[in-house]
Amino acid sequence: MKATVKWLDAMTFVGHSETGHKIVMDGDREGGAPTPMEMVLMSAGTCSAIDVVGILEKARQKIVDVEVELSGERADSIPKVFTSIHLNFVVTGHDIQAKHVERAVSLSAEKYCSVAKMLENTATITHSFEIKAA
C-alpha cells in the first residue's frame, strides 16, 4: 500500500491513495477539514462498521442503517496518542436480534478490525451497541 500527502497551504494537506482517492486534512482544528487524529478516530469507526455490517448481512439481519458514535481521550503530553476510545454501534433495522449484533461487534473488536488492533497498543478500546426499530 502506498500514498502521498501534499501540502496545500497553511496547515492544509491533501492525501492521495494509490487507488486514486483523495482526502483533505487540516492541522488546524478550526480549519476546513478533519485533523489527522480525527481521521484516525473515524477510521477506527469505519473499519469496525464495515465488519459489523458484513457480519450482520451474513447473519441475514435486516439492517437499514449502522452508525458508530465515537469518543476518544488523548494523552495530555506529547505525543498526544489516544489513551481510550469508545465505539457505540447504533444498528437500525427490522427484527434485529441482539445476539447477532453482540457477536458482530465482538468479532470486529477481537479479530477483524485492523485499525482498532493497531490502536489497542496505546488505547483501551471499549464497545457498546443499541438497536433501533426501522
Image (cartoon, rainbow, N blue to C red):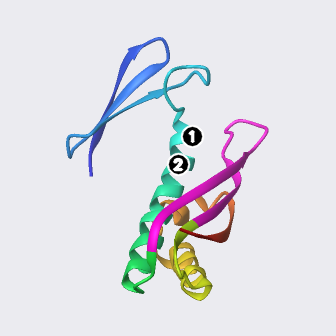
Residue at x 53% of width, y 46% of height: 40
Q: Residue furthest right?
A: 76
Q: Quadrant of residue 101?
A: bottom right
Magenta span: predominant SS is strand
Residue nearest the observer in this picture, 120 or 20: 20
Q: Quadrant of residue 16?
A: top left
Q: Quadrant of residue 69?
A: bottom right
Residue at x 57% of width, y 40% of height: 37
Residue nearest the observer in this picture, 103 or 93: 93
Q: Amino acid at mark 1?
A: Glu
Locate residue 96, reporting x and y percent: 54, 81
Residue at x 60% of width, y 81% of height: 102
Locate residue 95, reporting x and y percent: 53, 82
Whether pointer 1 and pointer 2 mark residues with C-beta atoms closer than 8 Å, the reply is yes
Dot 2: what SS?
Answer: helix
Locate residue 109, reporting x and y percent: 56, 73
Q: Which mark is residue 42?
A: 2
| Magenta residues, start to end | 63-90
Residue that mark 1 sits on? 38
Q: CA distance from mark 1 to mark 2?
A: 6 Å
Locate residue 8, reporting x and y percent: 37, 16
Q: Amino acid at mark 2?
A: Met
Q: Residue furthest top?
A: 10
Residue nearest the observer in this picture, 122 or 104: 104
